Image (tube, rainbow, N blue to C red):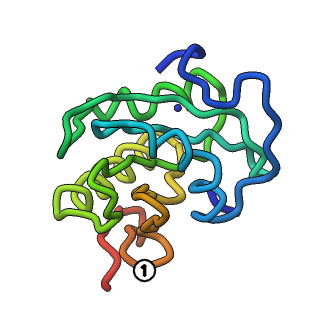
Amino acid sequence: MLFAADRSSDILAGRSFGPVRSAADVYRLLGPRAAKERVENAWIVLLDVHGHLNGTRRIARGYYDSVGFELSEALRPAQSAGVRYLVLAHNHPSGSAVPSSDDAELTFQVEQAAYQSGLYLLDHVVLGLNEYYSFRERGLFVVEKSGQVVRMAA
């Protein structure tokens, strides 16, 4: 199983979508919307314990080359919806899905904050034009080890 700040930003309004089990599913869900954006946006994908989609929320709208948000903004949609599993996604308007070092640091910070809040960040997916990058699929994710959140060795 794999894998957003008010209801008005729910991409799924009036649509049905099957279980989200991979970064490819996240790309299929958010890619068409992300491709239309001229600035970076960040979304949270909310999932139940079975990977069924609870919703998506845009949590931030940024600039051409960056998007920022408070960690609490990333977690609030999951807490409000009563779900424990989430995926962070953001677009790169340049079309390239290659993450920056800031993207990697953000992944670590959100995962750590989620863990401390009893939530599980399952992936961070960078959305490019006709491509995506999954931190989990690349093995560049953080894991729990002895009650501590640590960076996973690449």
Please determine whether, in this image, residue 22 is positioned above or below residue 48: below
Q: Give the position of the N terminus as an image quadrant.
A: bottom right
- Say left or right for 129 vs 4: left
Specify the quadrant of the image occupied by residue 69.
top left
Q: Give the position of the C terminus as an image quadrant.
A: bottom left
x then y, percent, for residue 34: 46, 43
Please determine whether, in this image, residue 11 is positioned above or below residue 140: above
Q: Residue at 19% of width from left, 34% of height from top?
A: 63
Instruction: Check disc 1: other Cα within 10 Å, few if <14, some if 14-19, many if 20+.
Output: few
- Say left or right for 123 vs 94: right
The residue indicated by pointer 1 is 139
Q: Residue at 57% of width from left, 56% of height from top?
A: 27
Q: Residue at 66% of width from left, 28% of height from top?
A: 82
Name which residue type carries label 1: Gly
Task: Name the secondary structure under disc 1.
Answer: loop
Q: Which of the pair 8/109 is nearer the observer? A: 8
Q: Residue at 59% of width from left, 34% of height from top?
A: 56
Q: Which of the pair 145/14 is nearer the observer? A: 14
x then y, percent, for residue 52: 78, 46
Residue furthest out toward the bottom: 154
Please determine whether, in this image, residue 67 is positioned above or below residue 24: above
| Tally of numbered tags | 1
x then y, percent, for residue 91: 37, 48
